[in-house]
Image (cartoon, rainbow, N blue to C red):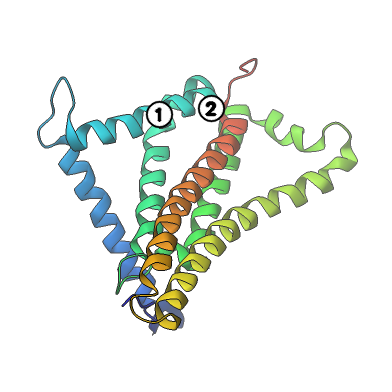
Amino acid sequence: MHEIVVRGAEQVAGFTFNTQTLYMTWIVMALVILMAWLATRSLKLVPTGWQNVMEMAIESLEEQAGVMMGKRGSFFAPFIVSLFLFLIVSNWLGLIPGFSSPTNDLNTTLGLALLVIVMVHVLGLYYKGGHYIGHFFQPFKVFVIINAVEEIAKPITLACRLFGNILAGEILLHILVQLLPIGVNAVPSVVWLAFSIFIGAVQAFIFTMLSMAYLGNAVKAEGEE
């Protein structure tokens, strides 16, 4: 039986913590570290097995980082790879009975989105200085209002898209298992599980690509396409 675990809440120094989300996040971090260890414990010149899978994923993301972020993309590639691995493991964790995805909690997705957007503005100021601030007033000064609204919307849309898709997938899988008779629910549950795995990978990819696009606007050198 697949069941969605209800999160506990704890009060610490006046703050409320979703302990279930924290536990699941720690599990995801441990799994990502384990994946990295398994891929690098016995490195081979001609990769095989898990090393080959990880190298293909990392090389693909590094290539995308170079395309979307320019010559500085390689510097930020470790962050991009780590973000993608964290997201895809988080999205898939909730498909295991007794576990829940950290990304089905808006606190997690909004935190990740805010991290990316804060990095965008800090790096934009670091690399481009006053020119970065100036682009908010282009093509006319009045456009600063529209550009400001767009910047506010970025973390909200990033967070809500990921949160909504992952939460909906877990709820629907739970409903299928609970409502359909045993035996009858096997086929639709397996089909929906496969679809949820696909959606989890797609949502991790979309979040990562959008993050690279936003970061690219901030870190690309002048004249880079």
Q: Is residue 181 left or right of residue 36?
A: right
Front residue of this view, candidates 131 and 115: 115
Residue 126 location, x and y as percent?
Answer: 56, 33
Residue 104 location, x and y as percent?
Answer: 47, 66
Quarter of the image holding residue 91? Answer: bottom left
Q: Which residue is tagged 1?
A: 60
Q: Is residue 13 visible?
A: no
Q: Residues within 10 Å of mark 1 (few under 14, many from 20)?
A: few
Front residue of this view, candidates 59 and 183: 183
Residue 19 tag number: none
Residue 70 location, x and y as percent?
Answer: 53, 22
Identify the element where label 2 is drawn. Answer: helix
**Which residue is at 13% across, 29% downward?**
43
Disc 1 residue type (three-letter): Ser
**Which residue is at 49% across, 62% downward?**
166
If you read the primary sequence from the N terminus, does the residue marked by circle 2 or circle 1 appear first? 1
Identify the element where label 1 is drawn. Answer: helix
Q: Is residue 116 visible?
A: yes
Q: Are marks 2 and 1 in contact (CB under 8 Å)?
A: no
Residue 130 location, x and y as percent?
Answer: 69, 31
Disc 2 residue type (three-letter): Met
Front residue of this view, candidates 37 and 111: 37
**Which residue is at 42% across, 60% downward?**
191
Q: Which residue is tagged 2?
A: 69
User: Which quarter shows the C terminus?
Assistant: top right
Q: Is residue 4 above or below residue 53?
A: below
